[in-house]
Image (cartoon, rainbow, N blue to C red):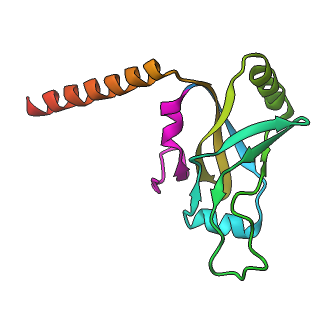
Amino acid sequence: MSKEKNSQGYKVIADNRQARYLYEILETYEAGIQLTGTEVKSIKAGRSNLQDGYALIRDNEAWLLNVHISPYNASGQYFNHEPRRTRKLLLHRDEIRKLIGKTEQQGLTLVPLKMYLKNGWVKISIALGKGKKIHDKRETIKKRQDQREMQRAMKNY
């Protein structure tokens, strides 16, 4: 989990690195998330995990499921949130219509890639992904190893 500030002006809080390995990423979208106060505090403390998360579209609304945001320790249990609750994604109507068409007709999946702070707001980058087959995953590993070997060879000369 990188906590650096990028040149674009946002701070990455959580990154789903496994998503790029499991899915072929076709398009990315930036969405806001409807959160409670303790969730925002916990996210700013860096206590969120996108590993098993995914997004769905139900009744013309986008929902983020199975993303774990740890309970905030400084508040009592009564005011705290449930860690894996379903959260609403804030997208434009046109974007939701596009996503409905692509997920239902083409059989694509909505996967969260990273969660970040942008101008004080918590944003999430979601992607339309197509599941990779085993041979595609092996090809990705092979390309990565070739890149490392090339970098090592360039470093030695």
Residue lying at 67% horizontally and 54% vertically, measured from the top left: 122
Q: Residue 130 versus residue 133: which sits nearer the camera?
A: 133
The answer to whether any part of residue 29 appears in the image is: yes
| Number of dots carrying numbers | 0
Identify the image quadrant of residue 102: top right
The answer to whether any part of residue 119 appears in the image is: no
Percent of width and height locating residue 66: 68, 50
Residue lying at 14% horizontally and 33% vertically, measured from the top left: 155
Percent of width and height locating residue 100: 81, 26
Residue lying at 72% horizontally and 42% vertically, measured from the top left: 31
Residue lying at 65% horizontally and 73% vertically, measured from the top left: 72
Determine whether, in the image, residue 116 is placed left or right of residue 88.
left
Q: Does 78 sit above or below residue 38?
A: below
Please, which residue is most extreme toward the right here? 59
Q: Does 149 sit above or below residue 6?
A: above
Percent of width and height locating residue 121: 68, 56
Q: Does 37 sit above or below residue 32?
A: below
Q: Does 155 sit above or below residue 76?
A: above
Determine whether, in the image, residue 143 is placed left or right of residue 122.
left
Q: Residue 96 versus residue 109: which sits nearer the camera?
A: 109
Percent of width and height locating residue 10: 56, 50
Q: Is residue 29 magenta?
A: no
Range covered by the magenta-colored residues: 1-23
Determine whether, in the image, residue 139 is placed left or right of residue 91.
left
Q: Is residue 22 magenta?
A: yes
